Image (cartoon, rainbow, N blue to C red):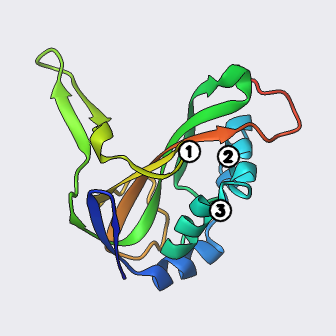
């Protein structure tokens, strides 16, 4: 199924995604830190538009290949997450929203071109790229799209936020 999200046009096999994510491990199966536990629990209360976005792609938002805390926001009431999900499909238009820049003749840094960020809802952004075998789950169907995220997620755990 072909979707257009901002500058990106992607062709996604929604049924293959849905089948994979039905049995994929949740984020906290591999990590029990408070950041991962918060992300997984908060996914159930993402805005409806974000949950609909994931459902439309056949992806369970509680099961990213990777999620990590960049920083705490609003005195610990939110966390700014990065991470990524895998999708079965192909990016048809604007495959690479990443910029690589040589720093000192030896070091190269990569970062997201913010002009490419697609805003699903206030504080929930994604970009897409073909390929990406980093942390590719066993049995994930090819071809692979990596969907990178930048999410500003509320702290929902009952315990204290140790990222303050």
Q: Which class describes the residues within 10 Å of circle 2: few (<14), some (14-19), or many (20+)? A: many
* Whether residue 115 is situated above or below residue 133 in the rendered picture: above
Query: Where on the picture, by quarter, is residue 51?
Result: bottom right
Give me the residue at 75% from left, 23% from top: 162
Does residue 163 appear in this view?
no
Badge 1 or badge 2: first in the primary sequence:
2
Q: Taking the image as drawn, is residue 100 in sight? A: yes
Q: Residue visible at 65% across and 55% down?
A: 47
Splitting the image into 4 quarters, where does residue 81 fall? top right
Query: Quick check: marks 1 and 2 in contact, CB under 8 Å?
Result: yes
The quarter holding residue 133 reads bottom left
Q: CA distance from mark 3 to mark 1?
A: 20 Å
**Closer mark to the observer between disc 3 and disc 2:** 3
**Of helix, strand and loop, which one carries label 2?**
helix
| 29 w.r.t. 55: above or below | above
Quadrant where the C terminus sits is top right
Check the picture and name the quadrant holding the N terminus.
Answer: bottom left
Sooner in the amino-acid sequence: mark 3 or mark 1: 3
Say if 93 sits above or below 101 in the image. below
Q: Which residue is mark 1?
A: 67
Near-viewer residue (135 or 103): 103
Taking the image as shown, residue 132 lies to the left or right of residue 57, namely left
Secondary structure beneath dot 3 equals: helix
User: Which of the two residues, 134 or 80, is positioned nearer the viewer here?
Assistant: 80
Label ID, residue 39: 2
Q: Tell me what residue is drawn at x 67 percent, y 60 percent.
A: 26
| In contact (CB < 8 Å): disc 3 and disc 1 | no
Q: Residues within 10 Å of mark 3 (few under 14, many from 20)?
A: few
Residue labelled with disc 3: 48
Percent coordinates x, y for residue 140 in the rendering = 45, 72
Name the side, left or right, on which 155 lies relative to 85: right
Measured as percent of width and height from the top left, residue 39 is found at: 67, 46
């Amino acid at each position: 199924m072909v979707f257009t999200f901002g500058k990106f046009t992607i062709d996604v096999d929604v049924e293959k995604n849905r089948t994979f994510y039905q049995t994929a491990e949740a984020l906290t199966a591999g990590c029990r830190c408070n950041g991962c536990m918060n992300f997984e629990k908060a996914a159930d209360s993402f805005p409806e538009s974000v949950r609909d976005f994931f459902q439309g792609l056949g992806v369970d938002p509680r099961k990213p290949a990777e999620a990590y805390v960049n920083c705490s926001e609003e005195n610990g009431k939110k966390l700014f997450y990065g991470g990524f999900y895998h999708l079965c499909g192909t990016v048809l238009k604007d495959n690479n929203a990443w910029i690589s820049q040589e720093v000192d003749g030896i070091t190269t840094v990569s970062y997201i071109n913010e002009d490419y960020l697609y805003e699903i809802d206030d504080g929930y952004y994604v970009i897409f790229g073909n390929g990406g075998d980093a942390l590719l789950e066993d049995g994930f169907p090819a071809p692979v799209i990596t969907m990178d995220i930048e999410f500003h997620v509320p702290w929902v755990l009952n315990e204290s936020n140790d990222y303050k």
